Image (cartoon, rainbow, N blue to C red):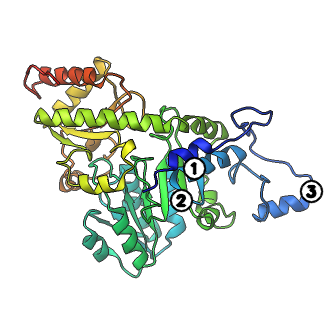
Amino acid sequence: MDRKAADRLQYLQYFGEFGGVNPSISDSSTYTFLSAKTMFDTFEGNTEGCYLYSRHSSPSNLYLGEALAALEGTETANVTGSGMGAITATILQLCGAGDELVSSRTIYGGTYAFMKNFLCRFNINTSFVDITDIEAVERSITPKTKMIFCEAVSNPLLEVADIKALAKLAKSHGIPLVVDNTFTPLSIHPIALGADIVIHSLTKFINGSSDCVAGVVCGSTDFCLSLKDVNDGAGMLLGSTLDSLRASSILKNMRTLHVRIKKHSENAQYLAENFEKDGLRVVYPGLSSHPGHELMKSMIVEEFGFGGIMTLDVGSLDKANALMEMMQEKNLGYLAVSLGFYKTLFSAPGSSTSSEISEEEQEEMGLSEGLIRFSIGLDNDIKRTYQQMRECMVALNILEETVSVR
């Protein structure tokens, strides 16, 4: 386990153009050269410290990329205009016509839709498997398989991937393991566990203020350079470019990531434990009842906990909708997709973030209609929050009224 990521982020120090404590923002789409030869060399990728065009790279994006590489312990990182931009570029860089990939069946709906409905246009096939069943993963690998993809903790069912076992399997077949670590930055370090490439939607916990969309691919220098190649780099040619202003704001927000993740996890752990005591079906990896609890416990950096995402099943979609609406009215959070905000966000994934998955497949996965996904916020008094959430549940006959002394 990598316990030094927060320290690496702390030690990063950049000076602005005029000595500012924040690096200057490069507010240009194109860059000038003093000689034509330097322009040519830069276009060919043969120069360092020179910039050609912001779709290729910019100082602001490179600053952020260095911080994200420090976070995940990789040689380098490429930032993108969205998490999906990072995922799609990575897949299309690794896979071509006739190739296959193996993916967890429980993943973000957009990723699932891209793999199931879009890649087939390029004759790229995806095998969706129970990622917690290593034997099932191995059975799905063929000579045409070019990568294994999973989320460290899956969206929205919170299944925990055995990254070390998956990495060993991937290496035995000579293919890369790609891990989406959006749910567990700082808590889990896939590279230290053997993964080859780590992806994040920066939109979520890493940025933490729900004011922008961005992504990143963390990996080797060779792979990240291949993504930016002007002739055949998927990152370069698909054009998922992050704006320099946004790159700068995300870099600033990363400085509080270690503080925020601790609080997200602490609050989620408290709510999960207490709602489980109330008799609700709670899914949270920090609970001993979670089937992946011991595995995740063996992978995490303990001080950052089990993450800020939990799910509750309240029995039906009608009850789920009524509860979310009431909690929003009581200022307990927002009925909204996404995660990592300072306020709690809640949604019914079957009709929102996983709506791309058919009802039959949702049922097979165990994604019930009454399931609510919570991204737990940074509430200072989580006991008060619990009592208020519980009052909403009592009012809707989800829980019985009892005197709580917790």
Asked whether residue 347 appears in the rendered view, the answer is no
Residue 9 occupies quadrant: top right
Residue beneath the point at 29% across and 25% down: 382
Secondary structure under tag 1 reads: strand
Do the CB atoms of the residues marked 2 and 1 lie less than 8 Å apart?
yes
Separation (CA) of disc 3 from disc 1: 30 Å
Q: Give the spatial CA distance, label 2 vs label 1.
A: 9 Å
Q: What is the quadrant of residue 398 in the picture?
A: top left
Left or right of residue 158: residue 231:
right
| Furthest residue in direction right, as rendered | 35
Answer left or right for 42 relative to 405: right
Q: Circle 2 sits on which residue?
A: 89
Q: Could you classify mark 3 by the number of other residues whose Cα lies within 10 Å: few (under 14), some (14-19), or many (20 or more)?
A: few
Q: Amino acid at mark 2?
A: Ala
With 279 as the anchor, is 380 left or right in this view?
right
Which part of the image, by quadrant, shows the C terminus?
Answer: top left
Q: Amino acid at mark 1?
A: Thr
| Residue 152 location (% of width, % of height) | 37, 55
- The foreground one among 114 and 4 is 4
- Give x and y (percent) for residue 138: 31, 75
Q: Residue at x 75, y 63 (%)?
A: 45
The residue pinned by badge 1 equals 80
Which numbered circle lies on residue 35? 3
Q: Position of residue 54 (x, y in %)?
A: 71, 48
